[in-house]
Image (tube, grey):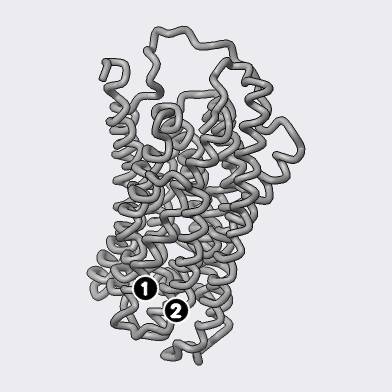
Amino acid sequence: MTATNDHRPRTLFLSAALHAFTHVYQVALIPLYLLIRDDLDLDGVGKATSLVTVMMISYFLPSYLAGVLADKFSKKNLLSIGLAVNGLGFIGLAHAGDYYAALGFVILAGLGGSLFHPAATSLIARLYPESTGRAIGLLGIGAGVGFLIGPIYSGWRAEMLEPMIGPSAWRKPVFELGLAGLIMAVIFNRYASDSKLQEHVQPKPEVKAPMFPTTALWMFFIAAAVFFGLRDFTGFGMGSLTSLYLQKAHYFDTKLTGSTLSIIFLAASLSNLVFGRVNNRLRWTAFVLVVAGVLVCITPFFPAEWIFAPLFVYGFFFMGTYPMIEAVLMESVPDSVRGRVFGVFITIGGGLGSLAPWILGEWVKNLGDPAIGNPTLFYPLYGLLTVTVLLSLIGLPCLNAIRKREQEEMLHHPPPTGEPAKTN
């Protein structure tokens, strides 16, 4: 390995660490819903779950702008700033005096987090053009670690402190996670690098390349983003719904709820590594989505003491779809537009998926007292999530059409930046 490329594994590792923090923040509040409801004196659990929905909407809606910034400015600096703002949002949330202040701080956290995926995914695709899927799979390990740590840590710390300080126990882990994010942002900015090019190499003249050269490609792209948004609806919904299901139907405490939810993501690191290496990614994605749908459907039928089993298998297969889809998307478009393409993709898909915690929280709220100790009332909700994940299969032929048409277009009209057309 030359000196030019020495930084690539280090940058990939640090990016995976940032990925972990990004997703820690997305799931840390999930075991804390009931404590937040009581501490902020909310009129139902729906308002507590809406904090996650608002944070996720704030996370996904600015993604196109984040992609524009990622295509134009230093990805390393954008990633550092994003994590710092995300952490500051959580520090502020830990001190929020009422629901509206909490809303403001989760919006701030979401805006900071929005910078991660467009910048990190395009950065890693640039650093590893010869093994994009594998590198994105390794990057995805960070997501699994973050999803695992978030609910375990917040649930454990809140359960430890609740006997001493009551419902406000949720604030301590939120503050600590925010502070850790600030520290990690400084470390990343110091040791990560932007590209495999030497700093003294003169950059090429900037050319404003279109994201997609034809209307047909745009239509396929929008359709793919919408249908994979249904996948994200299931992904976000499973965490929130299972949290409420375990606490209301099976009387789990905060600590046990957090540790049980983490089972979903325990296998995610392994699945990102495994599925990031496969060749026929679209076919494998279809397979894992079907398996994930089956696991969603049968989860509430398991006894509470065995529910970790379907959650573990679901997490392994469901989370494996992300590196495969992201690799196909990144390999299908030129480097000069990857940030914008991925930004629009997750704005649409993630924005749709982020509605799940609020919708499911309101549904559970409307179930009322009969939901307490009654698992059967939750069956229709798991059925809804089964339908949405299976409907996401429609996005696969749309994504395949993008890949084929974009490759044909680039063969006939090479990108103006001079980068080679992709044929893989």
Residue at horizontal 40%, vertical 52%? 23
The answer to which of 16 and 248 lies nearer the viewer is: 16
The answer to which of 188 and 419 lies nearer the viewer is: 419
Residue at horizontal 41%, vertical 33%? 124
Verify CB contact (< 8 Å) between mark 1 and mark 2: yes
Left or right placement of residue 225 versus residue 135 in this view: right
Circle 1 residue: 310
Coordinates of residue 47 in the picture (x, y in percent):
54, 69
What's under tag 2, amino acid-wise?
Answer: Ile
Left or right placement of residue 95 versus residue 383 in this view: left
Coordinates of residue 104 in the picture (x, y in percent):
53, 53
**Does any portion of residue 175 appear in the rendered image?**
no
**Does any portion of residue 212 appear in the rendered image?**
yes
Circle 2 residue: 298
The answer to which of 384 and 191 lies nearer the viewer is: 384
Element type where label 1 sits in the image: helix
Q: Is residue 63 above or below residue 106?
A: above
Callout 1: 10 Å neighbours few (<14), some, many (20+)? Answer: many
Element type where label 2 sits in the image: helix
